[in-house]
Image (tube, grey):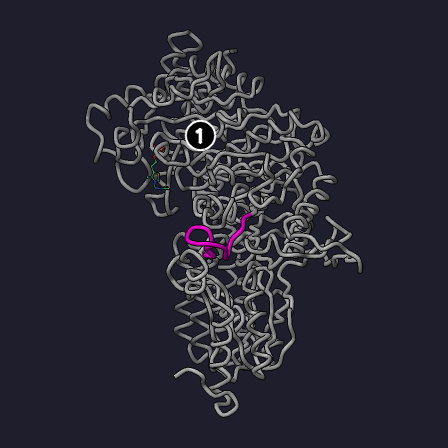
Amino acid sequence: MTKEEILQDYRLACESRQTSILARKEVFMGKAKFGIFGTGKELAQICMAKFFKEGDFRSGYYRDQTFMMATGELTIEQYFAQLYGHADIEHDPHSGGRMMIGHYSTRNLDEQGRFKDLTKIKVSTPDISPTGAQMPRLVGLAWASKLFRNNPALHSMTNFSNNGNEVAFGTIGNGAMAEGVFFEAINAAGVLQVPMLISIWDDAFAISVPQRYQTTKDDISSLFEGFRRDHNERGIEIMKVKGWDYEALCYAYKEATRICRDEHVPVLMHVCEMTQPMGHSTSGSHERYKTTERLDWEEEYDCNKKFREWILENGVCTEDDLIAIETDSVEKVKRARQAAWDNHLKAVHVDQDIAVDYLNQVAATSAHKEELQQLATELQKTLNPYRSDAVRFVKKALRLLRNESSASKSLLQDWAARTAKENARRYNSHLYSESVESALLVPEVAPVISADAPLIDGRELLQHNFEALFNRDPRLLAFGEDVGQIGDVNQGFSGLQDKFGEIRITDTGIREATIVGQAIGTAMRGLRPIAEIQYLDYLLFAIEILSDDVASLHYRSAGGQKAPLIIRTRGHRLEGMFHSGSPMQMIIGAVRGMFLCVPRNMTQAAGMYNTLIKGDEPAIMIESLNAYRLKEKLPENLGDFTVQLGIIDVLRPGTDITIVTYGSMCRIVQEGANELQQLGISCEIIDIQTLLPFDRTQQIVESIKKTNRVLFADEDYSAGATAYMMQCVLEGQKAWQYLDSEPKTLSAKDNRPAYSTDGDYYSKPSPDDVIDVVYEMMHEVNPSKFPKWYK
Ligand SMILES: Cc1ncc(C[n+]2csc(CCOP(=O)(O)OP(=O)(O)O)c2C)c(N)n1
């Protein structure tokens, strides 16, 4: 290494440390809400960054500011912009002010939401705060390199990979290692043999809790000895290095990245003897829980201090040279902080200044002159203002002015409307794709079914459709428990591994969180994964990752990144507990930001897959467990026909009541409606097809305008997805005003569904239940025409 490089490293270590010190002060001065910093971790990150190339990926956590600065993906000014919550990607490109400090993300998409050339970016995937939750994504990012290298059909995707040479770099704290998902990810990486380099920043504590409470052995790397590769067996490489030893760190990372990049073997890098000189975060001080001996040791072994000593011992430069660098870095950070603060204030002041002006104007002619002037003065004097301050003051003013009308009041009203729109854009946009590739732009193409179309099992129809999709698009891959050799437990992929190879259709271990992680990582790298969770009941093992990582990904990166993956699962009703759940409200509540498809049959499911593959949103597909063996006609345009997402399907026209349902319940409701017809009650049945998005064109209210009655039916618990649908329709579509009867819901019992036919009958809604609820509603309307049959 040259003298320049070493001194540049020292400069960066000093700048990063100063950044943390000044940022902490900003929080204590009330200029920012919360601070968590990368102090004590600077040196290892500088050394790691030396081997992080364009095209590589990072999945880390909130301590990685120095690494981000070293890779050139974070400036000090951007750091402070995020600290202040500057809601503008020009200033905080990592999250547009959405994430708290220390959460990084590069901008991988172009203006239209398409992937840029990822081989030219040092990619950081968007960080999340739940400890350990970066691990599943890391496995997938590394797995993608293996797919790119080993599948010749992908070699032309040169904007995404250079022969699979990319390493996925992960970071995690020593405490977070106790999370189950960490062990799951290490095991998965070892099984998959992927270029994943996971660094553990070991500072011996997790907030106040020492390591002995976290892991069986204090020495973390020795815990993993059983995973170590040897000459006979695959495994992972394990390395241990001290976080203050510059030379050793450089050597270790050089060797680790060589192993990952060349051999595609995962490496666990235990970086021990790290410190945390400023404590965990701005909430609390570490003097409360660290002994004096520990605090003294941390002072002595501070990595920046040790680096300084090493430079002097090795005669790289004089102490005066170092003092000059240290002084420079203080000044540089101060300037960057000031610039970020000025820009932040300037942005907030644009609307605030106008609001003050309008408040003064309206005060001049108002009966509430004094109160309004006072509002203007108070707003003007607000120290460290937020955007919402001006909004709150203007709303107060409009309440005072409710009985007045004037041109200046109108200005104030326009201001309120404009800023509401702009702030919605700042804080609520990009939950879903806004790109030219959105699945919502995919038009409907009906299935072409000839008169002599063969009647086949639903599972076969799916299999034929998957075959058509896989034939034409090499980016597609499918994986999960039993998906490979036997083509999934219901044979939707039957025979397709033989046809497309294990590289595209493959089995995985039983590890739902990292199956989803494989989907996230590969989707972020330009592939189109269909990841299977064997039964809907087991989605719970992955719901944290789906909710925290997948669903919020596009939003938290302010449209900077996307992961168009499909989670394929099956549920609703079959036999017994843990095999026939339908916890839809749990999913709806957890995955806003994903689409949730609930097809009633396999033609519909296939059409939805075809739509999703054309789009770029992540989605969950819940196939109906009991529909795989029902007969359906085989369409001719396999892979081409589509279902428009968020558009309802009227299964049966009717005049007395609208029944809104989806999935397996469509057949139950249809059966009930047949008998109700004989009883003189005409039901209009609506299959909503997708719970997210929900009835985008607001057609359900049109049905209710005609029937004036509505029943929401499904197999979720009470107050579950039926309550969600009711809110969407009665409040969202204002359907309440067309009702002549109390709106009703029909859901499953609150216990888990019991086993066998009787268990199903007494746990899930049956056609009898549909008839009872609807008949009771009609009895109330016309008791003589519909007399009760129960006591
Ligand atoms: C799932 C989850 N549980 C708890 C927390 C609260 N929390 C934030 S940081 C932290 C300690 C993490 O310690 P460690 O992994 O050693 O990393 P360090 O902060 O020391 O770098 C905890 C418990 C969290 N963010 N996520």
Task: In the rendered view, tell whether residue 706 sits above or below residue 93.
Answer: below
Residue at the outermost front position: 757
Residue drawn at 31 percent across, 19 percent down: 301
Q: Residues within 10 Å of mark 1 (few under 14, many from 20)?
A: many
Q: Which residue corresponds to mark 1? A: 171
Q: Relative to the observer, which residue lies in front, 354 or 635?
A: 635
Q: Is residue 392 visible?
A: no
Q: Is residue 576 magenta?
A: yes
Q: Which SS type dominates the magenta stretch?
A: loop
Task: In the rendered view, tell whether residue 605 sits above or below residue 312.
Answer: below
Task: In the rendered view, tell whether residue 540 sits above or below residue 743.
Answer: above
Residue drawn at 67 percent across, 45 percent down: 463
Mark 1: amino acid: Thr
Q: Is residue 179 visible?
A: yes
Q: Relative to the observer, which residue lies in front, 444 or 94?
A: 444
Give residue 138's position: percent from left, percent from top. Answer: 50, 33
Give residue 643's position: percent from left, percent from top. Answer: 68, 57
How many marks can you see?
1
Q: Quadrant of residue 179?
A: top left
Q: Relative to the observer, which residue lies in front, 627 or 592?
A: 627
| Ligand 1 image position (quadrant) | top left
- Does residue 304 appear left or right of residue 54 in this picture? left
Residue at the outermost bottom position: 784
Q: Relative to the observer, which residue lies in front, 523 or 21?
A: 523
Residue at the outermost right position: 451
Residue drawn at 66 percent across, 31 percent down: 501
Q: Quadrant of residue 697?
A: bottom right
Range drawn in magenta: 569-583
Give residue 97's position: percent from left, percent from top. Answer: 49, 47
